[in-house]
Amino acid sequence: MEMIPASSRGNERARGAFGLLVLLLGLQLTAGCGPQERTAVSADRPFRPALRQGFTQGRKPPQMTVNAVLDEANKDFSYRGVQIHPKLVNEFQCWISDLNPVTIVVDVAAASDSNEYSESTYKKGKYFTTKLDDEKTEYGYTRAHTAGDGIHVLKTRESGQGSGVFKQELWVRFEIGSGYDSDGNRCDQLLMRLVRAKGLPSER
């Protein structure tokens, strides 16, 4: 019988352990797929957002499914019957001196349950409008149209004390994500993702 050197047996064991490690890592990566893949097989399950403690005074909002949340966002550009706040869309704006926005994803569900996005809103012409933190700048948006691939084209309008009115076109789409609330509990997210931003001629 041919004897296998101890060093060769050790190399084989090392290669086997390495192969097992690669397999385990592959399984972890598959389990950690993107938000759309995670929810594709469970779109009829309840949508469970993170809720700010005390905001609902102990009353949970009416239950909706993941499909229902996405359908409402895409059809009405709203969440639980409330149109998406202009200040949340404003998060996608960047400085005029910059080429591309830094913020490209926001959680609509979390914003609906916050103080940060609770300023009063109003219609100014066709624009759904609010005043920003300085109370001197108005910012609004209107949904121009929706493309067949789920992209919503928004036209925005920003004006302050000066004579200039600055406009931009934003392309956004919705998707379901998942994360953890402040207590470490798993929660769902209604994500609005920026696909494209381009400047439009300003008004004087």
Image (cartoon, helix red, strand yellow):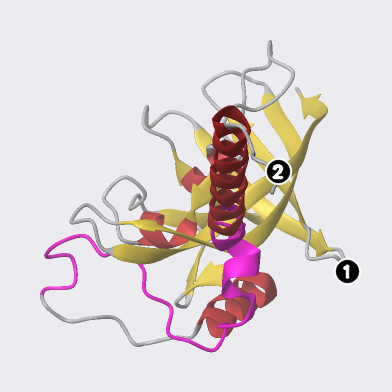
Residue 110 placed where, x, y %?
37, 57
Q: Is residue 164 above or below residue 14?
A: above
Instruction: Mark yes or no: residue 86 visible.
Output: no
Instruction: Mark yes or no: residue 55 visible.
Output: yes
Q: Is residue 102 magenta?
A: no
**Which residues make up the magenta segment?**
29-57
Q: Which residue is drawn at the image coordinates 70% and 43% (left, top)?
A: 2
Residue 93 placed where, x, y %?
61, 31
Q: Which residue is mark 2?
A: 2
> Of the residues shown, which amino acid type is indicated by label 1?
Gly
Q: Is residue 51 magenta?
A: yes
Q: Is residue 150 left or right of residue 157?
A: right
Q: Nearer the viewer, mark 2 or mark 1?
A: 2
Residue 83 placed where, x, y %?
52, 66
> Of the residues shown, which amino acid type is indicated by label 2?
Glu
Q: Which residue is drawn at the image coordinates 68% and 42% (left, top)?
A: 156
